[in-house]
Image (cartoon, rainbow, N blue to C red):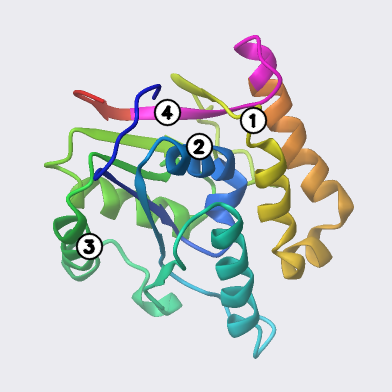
Amino acid sequence: MKNKRKNQYAVIFGAHPDDIEIGMAGTVAKLGNLGYDVKLVIASTPDRPKGSAEVRKTESRRAAKLMGCDPPEFLDLKTSEFTYDRTLVCRLDKIIEKHKPSVVFTQWVGDSHQDHQILTRAVLSASRKIDNVLMYETTIPSLFTGVPFGPRLYVDISQTIEIKKKAVESHQTQAKVYGDFWIKAIIGRSSYRGFQMRTAYAEAFEVAKIVKW
């Protein structure tokens, strides 16, 4: 990820608003700096409490701007539509075919949240012709699944950690739910991943497939 990648797309999928920011906001900003055209896709926007969906979309748009991206594409899937089936895979197929990305990012398939699992299974199916597919680390707090996240690729985000912090802070609806420790834990995890690769901050990914990048 050292060379400029002009005219290349990176498509990044998240099940809900804030998932992408928690997992890889620093990498998103870095991809933009490297010349990638970054496309954010959010599958579902929960409306709990009633009327909060539009607020959460506004938060996502604000975070996207901070990360240097265009506003996300919201698929507006309802809970009843969040199933791993041909309909969802075909919808994601169209997005991938439109942008022809050189790399696709999605959530970790071992995540304890069922929406995250379903989305990633569909993304992996839709990305069958894509050379490079990476899965970002599970959202926290998270239930233990018995399947440990196995980082295989690290991205140094020391230069973009403040962007990550501000992007996560854009999601005030979630900060109110989880409290101040939420943001501290997210940044703390980036610090821990940085320690593993001997830098200040990093984000880690599991590799579904890398052919050339």
Measure the C-alpha gap from mark 3 to mark 1.
Answer: 30 Å
- Mark 1 or mark 4, whichever is nearer to me: 1
Q: Residue at x 56, y 75 (%)?
A: 57
The stretch of residues the image draws in magenta is 194-207
Instruction: Say which element carries label 1.
Output: loop
Q: Quadrant of residue 103?
A: top left
Q: Residue furthest right?
A: 180
Q: Name the residue tied to disc 3.
A: 95
Q: Name the residue tied to disc 4.
A: 206
Measure the C-alpha gap from mark 1 to mark 4.
Answer: 22 Å
Where's residue 208, x and y in %?
Answer: 30, 31
Instruction: Say which element carries label 4.
Output: strand
Give the amino acid at mark 2.
Answer: Lys
- Of pointers 3 and 1, the one earlier in the residue sequence: 3
Where's residue 113, x and y in %?
Answer: 53, 54
Where's residue 81, x and y in %?
Answer: 34, 76
Left of 87 or right of it: where is 38? Answer: right
Q: Name the residue tied to disc 2.
A: 30
Q: Are marks 3 and 2 in contact (CB under 8 Å)?
A: no
Measure the C-alpha gap from mark 4 to mark 2.
Answer: 18 Å
Q: Is residue 197 magenta?
A: yes
For residue 8, which numbered disc appears in the image? none
Give the amino acid at mark 1.
Answer: Gln
